[in-house]
Amino acid sequence: MLERDLVFIGGGHTHALVLRMLAMKPIENVRLTLITDTLLTPYSGMLPGYIAGHYSLEETHLDLNKLCKAANVNLVHARVIGIDVTEKKIQLENQASLSYDKVSINTGSTPNVNVPGAREFGVGVKPVSQLTATWRKLIAEKSNSETPHWAIIGGGAAGIEMVLAIAHRFKETGEALKLSLVQSGDTLLPGYHRNVQKHVAIALKQYNIELVDNFRVAKVTEHAIESNTGKSLAIDQSIWCTPATAPAWPKAAGLDTDDAGFIAVNEFLQSTSHQDMFACGDVAAMIKSPRPKAGVYAVRSAPFLVKNLHAAFRQQPMTDLKLQTDFLSLVSLGGKSAVGQRGWLSMKGEWVWHWKDRIDQKFMALFDKHLPAMASMGDEPMHCAGCGSKIGPELLSETLKDLTLFPNKELATDLTQAEDAAVAAVLKNTQLLQSIDGFRAFTKDYYKLGIAATHHAVNDLYAMGIQPTSAQVWANLEFNHPRLIKRDFKRLMAGVTETLLHHETTLVGGHSTEGLETHLALVVNGSSESLWKKGAVEEGDWLMLNKPLGTGILLAADAQGIAPPDSVEALWETLLQSNREFFTAIKDQQIHAATDVTGFGLIGHLLEMLKGTPYDAELTLESIPLIKGALEQSQRGVESSLLPHLLPLLSQCDIGNKELAQVKCLLDPQTNGGLLISVSPDVVQEIMAKTDAIKIGEVHHTDKTENHKIKLVR
């Protein structure tokens, strides 16, 4: 049983290695959580190669989501804004706080934009986790002038590699760009071997890079930089590669820091002021034996941090950090050539670049080819969570029709014809509606699970045109120590209650249990004298949908550790998106019929709308929105475990020669899916003007009353 929480803040090089090591040798009874504001973290040694065009984004970045899946680490995708060291809670931006027993910090540094105007008009290369996004933004916003002028500020190794990489990239693409390397002194790479300095100077000349010496930038404007001596240099963009600064929140939290604000750590990488906190990488300052903020030290620190985390939880003696004072330093020269030094020895050539490349590739392979194997269920197939964990429609219908129900003339007793919410009582012509919805957890970030599940449950009432008024919750938390269950329950309920507030719905009660897995369900109530019916479509209606499809496919891909980070981010954007804005925009419109797209997919729920009516539907396949990456995963054969139970629905569809992978997206079980509405064309324009809903099809008359067909067209 897990008893204590070890939380890692930041996915830097040290933490990535530590998580991999702990997957192979776990700390007994300790739960691991990684908090990161980015799912992709770059390997700093390869970033100049990425900028130069030698490597792709995937080749230079660690997939932290994939690492956490393989290492059995809970992932919280959020930005840390502070720590309450007294309550031992980590404060997150736009999220509920997260409790810890011990914490390790590896967030890197922040850009030094203290020079007036630098924050508004300059671009910092730190933190490296944001550099690729920064680079894409630079390219997108590149001046349309004939030859833009960029100034790289900083004459150290980072500035030199950056300016040469940019020069090589633009030379290869044939685009014009003027580059200046601006430094406050008059010596390139101070402290480096003379031969290294000489080869760097030659490379700068070969790429026609202007070297601006003795220019300490004191002010930045939109089109110029000014020095402390009054000199001015006209530019279009400034890129800052100067020494970075510490984030503000560690010092604000009361942690000991050095004069620059970096977390002060002892010889065990332990905070000098708080024994339950550790720090490493750029964010840390080793007080007894200071080292430069270099990637090699971050990598070499990992085994020591692993040993000391084990020792800290066991209350055993820790191991002194022993790092060399000298290290191999390699500097890329734009193309596939590099210079390097170790002690008195210097080197230069293409072979140096290829040597560096082999070192870098070996490191990256640890997080791709050589990741620990994910936990297996043996011969048991993977079962999806979320709405993919529901029972198939045929099995459900066959079971419900055989049930014996107590008769009530005011209530519907044919459960096979159920609406999205059920009439639970009728009082003075007012119908009291009630719905229940829930599922097995698909994430260990229980705050976000609470948000997604609450949105999902509320949708049943929105699909009937009703404002929900009250709700109850059933939460089943997986077995853990009571301390951890309390923490999980608090975050889960924070997500639920904050989302109910958003929906203007009151939590009036609930029930809680423990079990093998976490489940969450909500009963949602509302009342109305008039309702939107599921099966009231009319001839000529347009079918409108307000959210993309694909949550089931992408949740399945994510569970297998094969979903790309950008698809995971797009998935969560959809899971956390409320339908309330859409509902409030259309609630006063003439809606003929509506439902929410959930466990039976778009096709399954549209067939429910058509059941018992004299109408067919025609869907325009290319108009149906999909979440980024959903179609690609479907083409790879990824699907929800519920999908085989939904495939028989295609017998009621005319799919022609359409790609099966694309058709399967229309059967994909949706968690917190969109609202599907059937409206006359004369109200569509007003709905489209107010919302992002799009037309995906039309309703047509047919002489058949059974076995309705949905026809897919281009």
Image: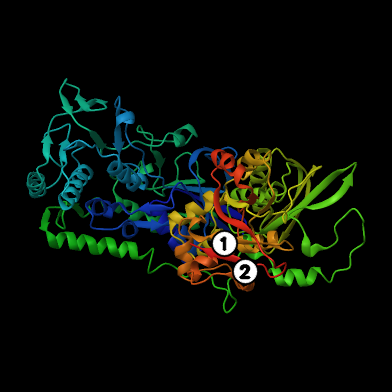
Q: Position of residue 537 (x, y in %)?
A: 69, 54
- Taking the image as shown, residue 598 lies to the left or right of residue 351, namely right
* Residue 599 visible within the image: no
Within-10-Å neighbours for mark 1: few <14, some 14–19, many 20+: many
- Taking the image as shown, residue 261 lies to the left or right of residue 71, namely left
Residue depicted at x 33% and y 62%: 364
333 to 656, vertically: above or below: above
Residues 526 and 306: in front is: 526
Q: Quadrant of the N terminus?
A: bottom right
Q: How is the image coloured?
A: rainbow
Pointer 2 with pointer 1, Cβ within 8 A: yes
SS for callout 1? helix
User: Which amino acid lies under the numbered mark 2 shown in the image of this protein?
Assistant: Leu
Residue depicted at x 57% and y 65%: 711
Residue beneath disc 2: 642
Residue beneath disc 1: 552
Q: Position of residue 47 (x, y in %)?
A: 28, 52
Residue depicted at x 20% and y 24%: 226
Residues 487 and 703: in front is: 703
